[in-house]
Image: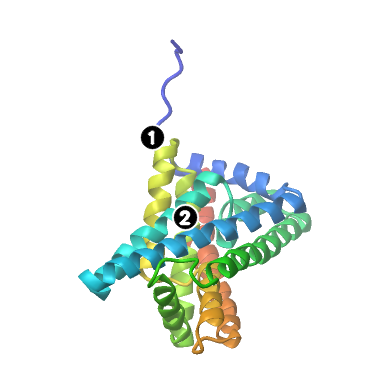
Amino acid sequence: MSDEPPRPAVLDPQEIYERAEAEGERRLSMTAQDQVMTGFIAGVTIVFGIVALGVVEALVEPSLGHGVAKLAGALAFAVGLVFLIVGRTELFSENFFDPVAAAIAQGGGKAWVRLARLWVIILALNLVGGAVLVGVISIDGALPEGAPHALVGAAEEIAGKEWAATLARAVLAGALVALLSYMLNAVNTVVARIMVAYLVGFLLALGPFDHVVVSALHLLFGVWNSSVVGYADLGVNVVLATTGNLVGGLLLITLTHTAQFRSERG
């Protein structure tokens, strides 16, 4: 038997932040090809969460009503985020905590250029990968009866929100996903990672809060399957959601934890 003491279930803030820096350096050091592949796969993967949401809502609503169906759909969507975390692929705003922590630690223009490249590639390929699978599920008969109607309803709800509400919900989504990145560095087991990812995925869909990739793919389904949602709605949402995600992820979570870390380190 090893004489080493067991690792604590949860680390202290200093250790969490140091883990984040190490993980961020790994992501910043990935080749462009690796970033393209992980971004594409993440976009494909999150659509399975969207599909689960639509299917479950369609099954539950006729017997239990709209409110319970929304709750059940959020519980189902969270599985998509678990797939992402366990599969080690990345949505755009997952890169707001770890790589930013690494870029701050490194300093210099080169680190920030690498961060910008990471953000652009991951966001673009999240959308491309997701669009491929949205195209597949848009084929007549690909989804169970009622699921397309539920997903179109979600798209129309997103498109119908006022810009200020969309921006506010995007701030909350950015904060949630950046908080997910922080908490993943705080736990040591796969089971704990799954639980954290599932809870954040549930809250993200329960809002629903506007994560730029998730909302854009919802809207794209609506564009291709509804006369109410258009490409203009998609474009406006991408701009507002990206802005809000950046504000929530960077200002509310990443920079505050950075200040905490530097203050405690002295």
Viewer-proximal residue, 252 or 124?
124
Label 2 crowd bin: few (<14), some (14–19), many (20+), radius 10 Å = many
Q: Residue furthest right?
A: 110
For this view, does 115 lie left or right of residue 255?
Answer: right
Measuring 44% from the left and 44% from the top, which residue is drawn there? 193
Give the label on residue 9, or none. 1
Q: Nearer the viewer, mark 2 or mark 1?
A: 2
Q: Do we see residue 266 in this rendering?
A: no
The quarter of the image holding the C terminus is: top right
Question: In the image, residue 105 lies at what x, y percent?
Answer: 65, 49
Q: Is residue 76 above or below residue 29?
A: below
Q: Quadrant of residue 70?
A: bottom left
The amino acid type, in three-letter code, at marker 1 is: Ala
The quarter of the image holding the N terminus is: top left
Q: CA distance from mark 2 to mark 1?
A: 22 Å
Q: Quadrant of residue 72?
A: bottom left
Question: In the image, residue 112 lies at what x, y percent?
Answer: 72, 59
Give the label on residue 242, or none. none
Measuring 59% from the left and 69% from the top, which residue is drawn there? 135
Q: Is residue 190 above or below residue 122?
A: above
Q: Secondary structure at mark 2?
A: helix
Q: Secondary structure at mark 1?
A: loop
Question: In the image, residue 116 lies at what x, y percent?
Answer: 71, 62
The amino acid type, in three-letter code, at marker 2 is: Leu
Label 1 crowd bin: few (<14), some (14–19), many (20+), radius 10 Å = few
**Mark 2 sits on what residue?**
81
Display colour scheme? rainbow
Viewer-proximal residue, 1 or 138?
138
Question: In the image, residue 98 lies at what x, y percent?
Answer: 58, 51
For this view, does 67 lie left or right of residue 158?
Answer: left
Measuring 58% from the left and 77% from the top, which residue is drawn there? 238
Measuring 67% from the left and 62% from the top, which residue is drawn there? 125
